[in-house]
Image (tube, rainbow, N blue to C red):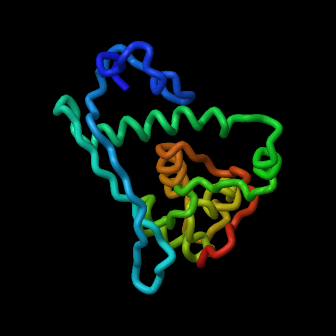
C-alpha cells in the first residue's frame, strides 16, 4: 500500500504481513495470474500459467518477468547450497555427468578421410572412445601413421582434450555403436 494512500491511525494499516511504503517506484502497475488446465496431445494432467502484467512503460512486461525470475533464482539458490540436507547426501550416488562433447561422433572432429576410416576400423565411433586410447594404441592401428596421429592430437587439443584420458562409466547406458 503506497504511503500517500494510507490514513494515519487506520487499523487496517497495522495488519500483520502488510508492508507500508512511503512511495511506489515500481514500474509494474498490476499483475494477475491464473492456473488453468492444459492438454498436450493425450495428456490432460498438465497446468498452464497465464499471467497479465501491466507496466508503466519503463520496462516491458517480458523484461519484468525476466528480472523477477532472475531474482527468484538468486534468492532460492541459497537453499540449493545448504549442507547437511538429504538432497546433498543423495547427490554423490548419482552417476557422474559426461561432457556432451564426448558423446559426439568422431566425424564431428572433421578429420581427414584416412584418419576417420582408421578410427572406424578400430570401432572408435565417439570422441569419448578416442580420448581413452593412448598414442601407442593408435599407432598400432593399420594405416594410421605419425602424421594422422598428430592431426588427431591437434584437433583434440583445440577442444581441450588429449589422448590417454581416463573416463569413468564409459560408455554411458544407451549409447549406440
Q: Residue 166 placed where, x, y %?
A: 73, 52
Tell me the quarter of the image containing the C terminus. bottom right
For the question of whether residue 96 can be seen, the reply is: yes
Tell me the residue at 48%/72% (across/down).
46
Location of residue 25 (image quadrant): top left
Tell me the residue at 28%/50% (across/down).
52
Q: Residue 36 placed where, x, y %?
A: 40, 67
Q: Is residue 7 above or below residue 143?
A: above
Tell me the residue at 80%/52% (across/down).
90
For the question of whether residue 112 can be seen, the reply is: no
Location of residue 37 (image quadrant): bottom left
Q: Nearer the viewer, residue 66 or 9?
A: 9
Q: Nearer the viewer, residue 56 or 148?
A: 56
Tell me the residue at 52%/56% (across/down).
101
Q: Is residue 2 above or below residue 68?
A: above
Q: Nearer the viewer, residue 110 or 151?
A: 110
Tell me the quarter of the image containing the N terminus. top left
Q: Residue 57 placed where, x, y %?
A: 16, 33
Q: How many marks?
A: 0
Q: Residue 89 placed where, x, y %?
A: 82, 47
* Residue 149 horizontal side relative to residue 108, left or right: right
Which residue lies most toward the left here?
57
Amino acid at each position: 500500500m503506497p504511503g500517500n494512500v494510507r490514513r494515519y491511525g487506520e487499523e487496517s494499516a497495522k495488519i500483520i504481513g502488510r508492508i507500508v511504503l512511503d512511495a511506489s517506484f515500481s514500474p509494474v502497475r498490476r499483475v494477475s495470474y491464473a492456473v488453468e488446465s492444459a492438454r498436450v496431445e493425450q495428456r490432460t494432467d498438465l497446468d498452464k500459467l497465464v499471467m497479465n502484467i501491466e507496466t508503466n512503460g519503463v520496462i516491458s512486461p517480458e523484461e519484468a518477468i525476466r528480472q523477477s525470475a532472475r531474482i527468484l533464482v538468486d534468492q532460492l539458490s541459497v537453499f540449493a547450497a545448504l549442507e547437511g540436507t538429504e538432497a546433498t547426501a543423495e547427490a554423490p550416488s548419482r552417476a557422474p555427468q559426461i561432457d556432451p562433447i564426448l558423446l559426439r561422433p568422431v566425424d564431428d572432429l572433421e578429420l581427414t578421410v584416412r584418419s576417420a576410416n582408421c578410427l572406424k576400423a578400430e570401432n572408435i565411433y565417439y570422441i569419448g572412445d578416442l580420448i581413452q586410447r593412448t598414442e601407442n594404441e593408435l599407432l598400432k592401428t593399420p594405416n594410421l601413421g605419425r602424421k594422422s596421429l598428430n592431426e588427431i592430437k591437434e584437433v583434440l587439443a583445440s577442444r581441450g582434450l588429449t589422448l590417454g584420458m581416463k573416463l569413468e562409466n564409459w560408455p554411458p547406458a544407451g549409447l549406440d555403436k
